[in-house]
Image (cartoon, grey):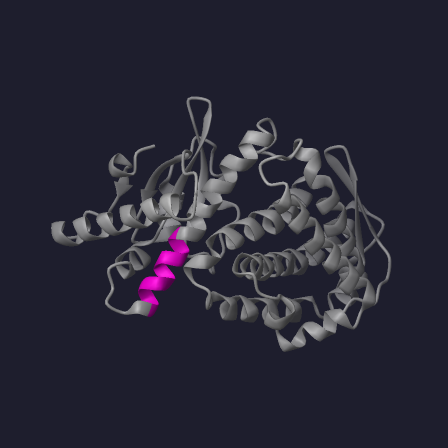
Amino acid sequence: MDIETLPINLPDSLSKDLADEVGTAIREQLSELISVAGFDLSLLEGVSVPTDLRQGLLAFNSGLGDEHNSGMRDTVNAKMVTTMRNGQLGAHVFFPLSSATDLCSGDSGSRQTAQYVLAHENAHCHDLLKRLEVMPADVRKYPIANPLSICLQVSWNEYAACRLSAFKMPTMVETMKEGLRQAVQGLRGVSKVAAQSFAPTQEGRQAALSIALDSSVAFLQAFSYALGHCRGLGISLNESLPENFVLLQANPNCSTALQNIANELDALWAAYGEWPGFEALNPLLEKICRFIFVSTGVGIKRHADQMSVGFVPTVGI
């Protein structure tokens, strides 16, 4: 992959001068990520700069159907999409026009934020390659039930991307602190709501599972953001936690489960690029399931690529 010839798809509405300026700025940032940060962007097939991110993604042909739209939320402001071309996995980064033009902004804060967003999405590209090298058969679709796959992906993928891109914007830790505060708030009372929804039927289990995952996946993502960012900067996570985190720490089971997740993420990082295969992620998956159980009461047990769901009343937060 040659940065100078990498396709950068810009809106026709841009003037030639601005299009040239934006394209040059993107190439300069990608070159820096490779030469300074050591990113391997071999899988990167191109960068698209849509005026509307959601519409751009909806119209995009990834070669893998529309699965890249399944995780879209209003808070997503850029996205790395996994692609399939002629039987080979690749990556395509969507970087909205508003962020792309900020790369050329005279406002240093806006410019740094845009640089960070671009670095974060390309960190996902680098991480995709690292995982492809050690588990080529499983990297696109993990051999586990989809709810568990989502939990695993938001935990490892965001931890890795945030750890890799933290150098671009150290002050992003404050944004992540606020995101974690909101995620903790989202967990409050979930165990009671799940208890009210659970029944020993397929519908009852699904209802409780949906309630548990809505809050715990959001929390796992926010926790992984913050942990990865702090590890990337070499600073203490404990000094970057929101004030309401004490609600989790007050429950010894939750506190221990979170520490175990952090330990597993750090262990995976220590062996980055040398995993024996998908099985390297199994300990992390077990710790994630434990956290979901102690924080929501919903127990998830894996059976090959299937799972069972149960409920036991728990303190939660």
Q: Residue 280, image x and y in percent?
A: 69, 37
Residue 144 visible to an observer of this rendering = no
Residue projecting furthest to the bottom: 243
- For the image, the number of numbered tags is 0
Residue 204 visible to an observer of this rendering = yes
Quadrant of image for the C terminus:
bottom right
- The relative height of residue 263 versus residue 139 in the rendered view (above or below) is below
295 sits left or right of 62 in the view: right
Q: Residue 221 falls in which quadrant of the image?
A: bottom right
310 sits left or right of 242 in the view: right
Q: Residue 181 falls in which quadrant of the image?
A: bottom right
232 sits left or right of 239 in the view: left
x 56%, y 69%: residue: 177
x 13%, y 52%: residue: 17
- The relative height of residue 191 versus residue 118 in the rendered view (above or below) is below
Q: Residue 57 falls in which quadrant of the image?
A: top left
Magenta-highlighted residues? 109-118
Q: Residue 142, image x and y in percent?
A: 63, 35
